[in-house]
Image (tube, helix red, strand yellow):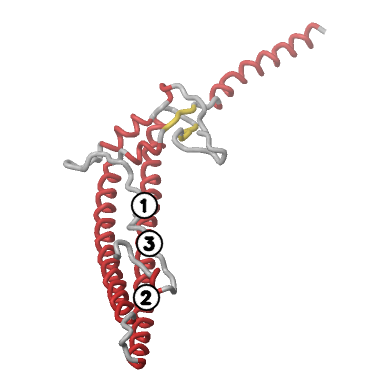
Amino acid sequence: MNKLLSSLLAITTFAGVAAVPALAETAPKIVVVEMAKLLDDHYETADQNAKLKGDEAKANEELEKLNKEGQDLVAQLKELEEKGKNPALAADAKEKLQTEMRAKIEEIQRKQNEVQSFRGNTQRSLQQRIQNFRKIMFEKINVTVVEVAKKKGATLVLDKSGFSHIGISPVIYADSSYDITEDVQKEINKGRPAGAAAPASPAPAATPAAKPAATEDAAKVTFPGAK
């Protein structure tokens, strides 16, 4: 009986000792990082924002040109309308004038469609460029995040800048000593070219001038700024 009890105690003791290092090996070390900050402050983001703003400015210049052309067409239509008010105008002249007015309205509507198409294509193009850039940058930043996390012995990295489907951050609380954002940023800036642009806020999607209203009514066919 004593021998059996001794054997059981020995087995129990061995199992307890063996379990300690196993738990220690599997215990997770969690760190947090702010991916949005790393993207916003990245030197490549500043360069990209400058390019986007330049292209947006060019697009707005082209949009203003198209709107000016539309305003001129509206002014021409109003001149035709004024001529049509002349009571001394002959019947055939009135009919010709009506034909010219209908043609002018169609021309105005084509110009409106051109403006709307240009605006939509420009917005989609800029938004797609922003999305593609962010995707590439997050993949690039993620490599550095993993490298820094491994150096710190981390087994799990959480992004504290994101929001869940219910609108709250996935990281409710994190001790600042577990935040590796600054460490990652230092690693990123090791590759910063001399003279690289300073960090800047992300460029918003292009929002050219307000779109003109389209209508069949000649008196209501207008472009921004038309008088």
Instruction: Point out the frontmost of discs 3 and 1.
Output: 3
In the rendered structure, are the residues bearing label 3 and label 1 in contact, judged by CB atoms less than 8 Å apart?
Answer: no
Which residue extends farthest front?
87
Q: Which residue is mark 1?
A: 205
Q: Residue at the location (59% across, 18% down)?
A: 20
Q: Position of residue 66 (x, y in %)?
A: 28, 68
> Which numbered disc flags the more N-terminal residue, 2 or 3?
2
Mark 3–mark 1 distance (CA, rounded to whole Å): 16 Å
Label 1, label 2: how far apart the Cα atoms are? 26 Å
Closer to us: 36 or 70: 70
Q: Could you tell me how far apart the alpha carbons at marks 2 and 3 are, in whole angstroms?
A: 14 Å
Question: Is residue 1 left or right of 25 when viewed as pictured?
Answer: right
Q: Earlier in the sequence, mark 1 or mark 2?
A: 2
> Please, what is the three-letter code of the amino acid marked with disc 3?
Lys
Of label 3 and label 1, which has the lower sequence position? 1
Query: Which residue is identified by label 2?
Result: 110
Q: Residue furthest right?
A: 1
Q: Badge 3 local density, few (<14 within 10 Å), some, or many (20+)?
A: some
Nearest the camera: 145 or 1?
145
Q: Amino acid at mark 1?
A: Ala
For the C terminus, the quadrant is bottom left
Q: Residues within 10 Å of mark 2 (few under 14, many from 20)?
A: some
Q: Secondary structure at mark 1?
A: loop
